[in-house]
Amino acid sequence: MPAKPISLGSLQFASKGEAFEYLREILYRYDVGDRVGSADAAVVLAALLRHPSAASKMGAGVKDFSVRSADFGTRCFWINRTDGTTEKFSISACIYKS
């Protein structure tokens, strides 16, 4: 089966795998506890909008994103909502389950 192109905001990728790797590079560009910069946050938001549970993940609204620890010592993106609550989300779910 040929690769299926995917868009994340204004960025175009030849395959879901390329999009996933791009997001992974963003994830590891930051130290645990850092807030994601605005240019990268635009791409992360575009990915989040593809998440099967995007509306519930975004909740009251997205203030910004950070990189934090997740299960078993891994790292992932966290949504920092406008109401002060936080929620983690999987970039894999954004790319492969949408």
Image: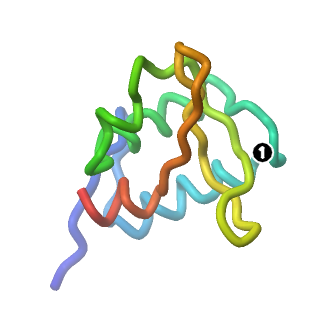
Residue visible at 40% across and 37% down in the picture: 57
Q: Can residue 23 be seen in this view?
A: yes
Q: In this view, does 52 lie to the left or right of 80?
A: left
In the rendered view of the protein, which quadrant contains the C terminus?
A: bottom left
Mark 1, secondary structure of its residue:
loop
Residue 56: x and y in percent read: 33, 36
Question: Which residue is at the front of the view, 68 or 50?
Answer: 68
Outermost residue on the bottom side: it is: 1
Residue 55: x and y in percent read: 29, 33
Q: Label 1 crowding class (10 Å Cα cut-off): few <14, some 14-19, many 20+?
A: some
Q: In this view, does 10 lie to the left or right of 79?
A: left
Residue 59: x and y in percent read: 39, 26
Q: Where does label 1 land, which residue?
A: 30
| Quadrant of the rendered image containing residue 63 | top right
Q: How many labels does the image show?
A: 1
Residue 65: x and y in percent read: 61, 32
Residue visible at 83% across and 47% down in the picture: 31
Compared to residue 14, the image places residue 31 above or below, namely above
Residue visible at 60% across and 46% down in the picture: 77
Q: Is residue 97 left or right of residue 34?
A: left
Compared to residue 42, the image places residue 19 above or below, namely below
| Quadrant of the rendered image containing residue 69 | bottom right
